[in-house]
Image (cartoon, helix red, strand yellow):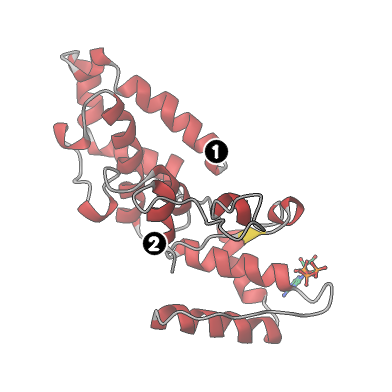
Amino acid sequence: MHFNGKQEWALCQILYRNFSHEQTLDNSRDNYIDLQQNEFIHYYAEDFAYRDIPNSPLRVQAVLQKVNIVLQLHSKSISDFDLPELLPETNSRELSLLLLEELNYYIISKDIAKISTLNEAQYIIFDAVMKLIDLRSGGILFVDGPTGSGKMYLYECLFIYLRVRQLIALAVAFSGITILLLHGGCTVHLRFKIPISILDGNSTCNIDKENDSAKLLKEVV
Ligand SMILES: Nc1ncnc2c1ncn2[C@@H]1O[C@H](COP(=O)(O)OP(=O)(O)OP(=O)(O)O)[C@@H](O)[C@H]1O
């Protein structure tokens, strides 16, 4: 059974809250053993972190991150248990929830297969965007085309490809209707904290450099 990101997250919270219940963490031997068995991690990696990511260690890291967050609520952490190591670069102590959300999209093989169905024009743009991203040189690309020419389809494929690679790409649009078409979409105003009144000459995006939004924006490819 597969779940979407929000359902999955909710289920993880419930399950891992149970795992991190005081009784489990203290000395109830049976539960404690369950939690220590690495098989449990792989089981949940399949159930809760399955993203068609061909990289099993990454899936395990995704589960460990989620478990760690709940454990932290109980003043414990992954390192208190005999579980695979949570790598520093994926340690949820450093990754904000916003970032974790962006790293945990539910992508199935059907989505990935879409990329191979891009038509020639779409593929040229897809390729250009990927080259720019791989160069990490930054840049602005503007895609235009008549209604129904497949712009949104192209954007979907770009997001799928980047998210499978565990890269951060934020889907934003000016209208609430448009964001419904983009998985994980968010209005520009919400994402960049643009004040509603932008005409007074002094308005700025209200993002503190230390907060989670700023950390997320810094990770964007
Ligand atoms: N390469 C493709 N293979 C199969 N279906 C495609 C492809 N490209 C686009 N489509 C389909 O064509 C339809 C129109 O595509 P899409 O909505 O992406 O166009 P658009 O340019 O974003 O349109 P609009 O400007 O009206 O928003 C959609 O049903 C989409 O699924």
What residue lies at 28% left-to-right and 29% top-to-bottom?
71
Other-residue count near label 1 (Cα within 10 Å), few / some / many at <14 / 14–19 / ≥20: few
Foreground mark, 2 or 1?
2
First-in-chain label (2 vs 1): 1
What residue lies at 55% left-to-right and 51% top-to-bottom?
193
Can you identify the residue that label 1 sits on? 6
- Is 1 on the left or on the right of 56, as rendered? right
Quadrant containing the C terminus is: bottom left
Q: In which of the image's four quarters is ligand 1 placed?
A: bottom right
Depth order, front residue of 208/120: 208
Distance from the alpha carbon under mark 2 to that under mark 1: 22 Å
Q: Amino acid at mark 1?
A: Lys
Depth order, front residue of 217/221: 217
Element at label 1: helix
Element at label 2: helix
- Is 95 on the left or on the right of 13, as rendered? left
Q: Amino acid at mark 2?
A: Glu
Can you identify the residue that label 2 sits on? 219
Q: Is residue 196 visible?
A: yes
Other-residue count near label 2 (Cα within 10 Å), few / some / many at <14 / 14–19 / ≥20: few
Q: Is residue 187 visible?
A: no
What residue lies at 44% left-to-right and 59% top-to-bottom?
217
Q: Which image quadrant for residue 214?
A: bottom left
